[in-house]
Image (cartoon, rainbow, N blue to C red):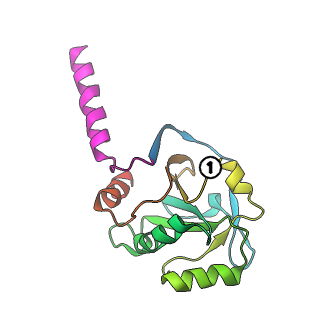
Amino acid sequence: MRILILFTFLITNTLANELPDFKNLVVHKIPKIYDNIIFLDDADEEINIQNLDSQLIILNFWATWCEPCKEEMPSLNRLQANKKVKNLIKIYPINIGKENLNKVNSFFIELGIDNLKPYFDNPSTLAKTFSLRGVPTTIFLNSNREEFARIIGSINFDDENFINWLKNLI
């Protein structure tokens, strides 16, 4: 019994130490399951997450009027191109501001976003599905397309602890 308790303690401590130190990162003990997660590309074509190939899907919900979104988007752009995780993740920045394509494209150009394409939640069904309380919010989906973590608010996606955490997930 003592060995089991010690083993459980060591494993729990190890996992806790592997988490990046972000106060707004929430890791679920039991992954959340959603049905029918669909969003739109820039040609209004539906994208169903069940049909996507990546091992790890990152959905980032944002809007052009959101100052924290504007601050974090360049580091999210660099994360998609980061050689340590590039072929392991796919990031989908989903605009929930009901903004038109020209405004969104101008936002991407202004910030130098060249590794990501904009996607859209129209008419805000995913914002409701994921119970978003604000933007930015980033949802992490595993290979079974279950939400296992989320970030509420903005972070620096260049943070090495965060990148190492991502690498260890896959």
Q: Residues within 10 Å of mark 1 (few under 14, many from 20)?
A: few
Would you place residue 72 above or below residue 128 in this image? below
Q: Is residue 103 above or below residue 152?
A: below
Q: Is residue 16 left or right of residue 94?
A: left
Mark 1, residue position: 133
Q: Position of residue 38 (x, y in %)?
A: 70, 60
Q: Which residue appears at 41% of the width and 75% of the height? A: 81
Image quarter of residue 75: bottom left
Q: Most prominent secondary structure in the magenta stretch? A: helix
Q: Residue furthest right?
A: 123
Q: Residue at x 73, y 79 (%)?
A: 43
Query: In which quadrant is the N terminus drawn?
Result: top left
Q: Nearer the viewer, residue 42 or 51?
A: 42
* Kind of element beneath mark 1: loop
* Range of magenta residues: 1-24
Instruction: Identify the amino acid type marked 1.
Output: Arg
Measuring 29% from the left and 46% from the top, which residue is drawn there? 18
Q: How many marks?
A: 1
Q: Is 83 a magenta residue?
A: no
35 relative to 25 in the view: left or right: right
Residue 73 screen position, x and y as percent? 49, 71
Please identify the quadrant where the C terminus is shown. Answer: bottom left
Q: Quadrant of residue 92?
A: bottom right
Q: Residue furthest top?
A: 1
- Where is residue 17? Give x, y as percent: 27, 43
Q: Is residue 13 magenta?
A: yes
Left or right, 39 with reference to 70: right
Image location of residue 153, percent across then percent down: 50, 55
Residue in the image at 42% along x and 64% along y: 88
